[in-house]
Amino acid sequence: MTTLADCRALDAQDPLRALRDQFTIPEGVLYLDGNSLGVMPKAAPARIAEVVTKEWGEGLIRSWNTASWFDLPQRLGDKVARLIGAAPGEVVCTDSTSVNLYKVLFAALSQQKDSGRKLVVSERSNFPTDLYIAESLCRERGFTLKLIDASELQGPDSVLTDEVAVLMLTHVNYRTGAMHDMKAVTAAAHAAGALTVWDLAHSAGAVPVALNESNADYAIGCGYKYLNGGPGAPAFAWVHTKHAGQFEQPLSGWWGHAAPFEFTPHYRPAPGVGRYLCGTQPIIALAGLECGLDTVLAAEAFNGDHGAMAALRTKSLALTDLFIKLVEERCAGQGVSLITPREHAQRGSQVCLSREEGAYAIVQALIARGVIGDYRAGDSQMPDILRFGFTPLYIGFEDVWNSVEHLVQVLETGEWKREEFNRKNAVT
Ligand SMILES: *Cc1c(COP(=O)(O)O)cnc(C)c1O
């Protein structure tokens, strides 16, 4: 049996533990929801205040040049690139994940419009906004969205046929934490003649991603989850350089123009990923995102040439392994089962549990104790889920022990059955 002392010993040996000092975490809170909204970097309030009072207040319009506002989307994109196996100049930070998905999926569909291929394939369990965006784009562009289970991508009866135009997947599933093998799946899609669109919402800052090495085509991701960019932070978009000269941007605004300040009447796309910008960028929000990105990049100092994510991944797996072990040792007989795959190569940085009864109320009871995870409703395919995200930047091994200790108490005492924990809130 694992003990609290064992967990403390792991913290004492943890080379990354000082990274936690980069964040403001409220007293008494054990935050296991960095997969939904990352915690606030300590640097963010002062940096945002500086942008507002100095750069906006004093610099005014001059700040587009003097404070480098103009190239912020590319400069931050270069920072994201270091976390997702991309090169400088290949990523921009802009718009929301949903909007960026619209842009990249449109681009991929345009490339396939003369191929005779009519299917966009995605997973039934994908995040709803991805499916909604794909649904409307397919309707608009004359394609059909085909929803599958991950297992249908493999084997002799694979759905990857010569009818598939685009395979659109979320790399790490938001609900189960299951992770695709990006390189293998991309190779299978390419062998079938399809292009790939990857959503990295639960990957960027959570697991190592190798976009170029995987030869992926398009990718997008979220700024406010593991990248700690703040609520509604700008998202990012990436395109492989092999498509750089030819992909279409449907939201052809002036910021994606090759020469926006020539004010010409006709659109001429900027080379490469720059054309994914649409209009004037949210500078204050981008400043918050930069603070978040810097907290993740700080892990580069701990792993030589292998990048921030290699160091963070080692700790992330140790944390999630420990959580699984403790839940299995201490919650046996409580009806809790593990949904997330056990194999390291098949999971992200979160662990999901299910329970026949009370999943929502158990999460509420934990939140009342300061242990913040979240709940995701089940459907015909999937039970209700208790979801716990482990962000190695600010979660330690004793935190894992304490979170399981609270879970044990909530289950053993039946505390979750209290009426107050069974009332539904608007945002779960
Ligand atoms: C969080 C998440 C989003 C969020 O999209 P927004 O446009 O920021 O609301 C999209 N897709 C996936 C897979 C996500 O996990």
Image: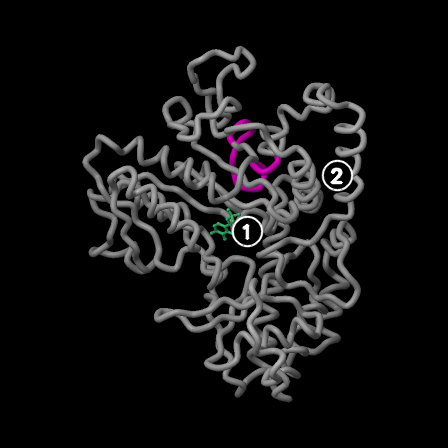
Q: Where is residue 104 in the image (x, y as percent from the top left)?
A: 41, 36
Amino acid type of disc 1?
Val
The circle drawn on residue 426 is: none
Q: Give the range drawn in magenta.
A: 79-90
The crowding category of the residue bearing disc 2, from other C-alpha atoms within 10 Å (few below 14, some 14 to 19, many at least 20), is: many
Q: In this view, does 178 lie above or below 186?
A: below
Amino acid type of disc 2?
Ile
Residue 213 left/right relative to 137: right
- Where is mark 1, residue-wise? 207
Is residue 83 covered in magenta? yes
Q: Which of 322 and 42 is in front in this view?
A: 42
Which quarter of the figure has residue 307? Answer: top right
Q: Position of residue 90 (x, y in %)?
A: 51, 30
Q: Where is residue 345 in the image (x, y as percent from the top left)?
A: 47, 57
Q: Nearer the viewer, residue 183 or 385?
A: 385
Q: Which of marks 2 and 1 is in front?
A: 2
- Where is mark 2, residue-wise? 48
Q: In this view, does 245 lie above or below 167?
A: above
The residue at 44%/55% (across/down) is 127
The crowding category of the residue bearing disc 1, from other C-alpha atoms within 10 Å (few below 14, some 14 to 19, many at least 20), is: many
State which quarter of the image contains the C terminus: bottom right
**Mark 2 element type:** helix
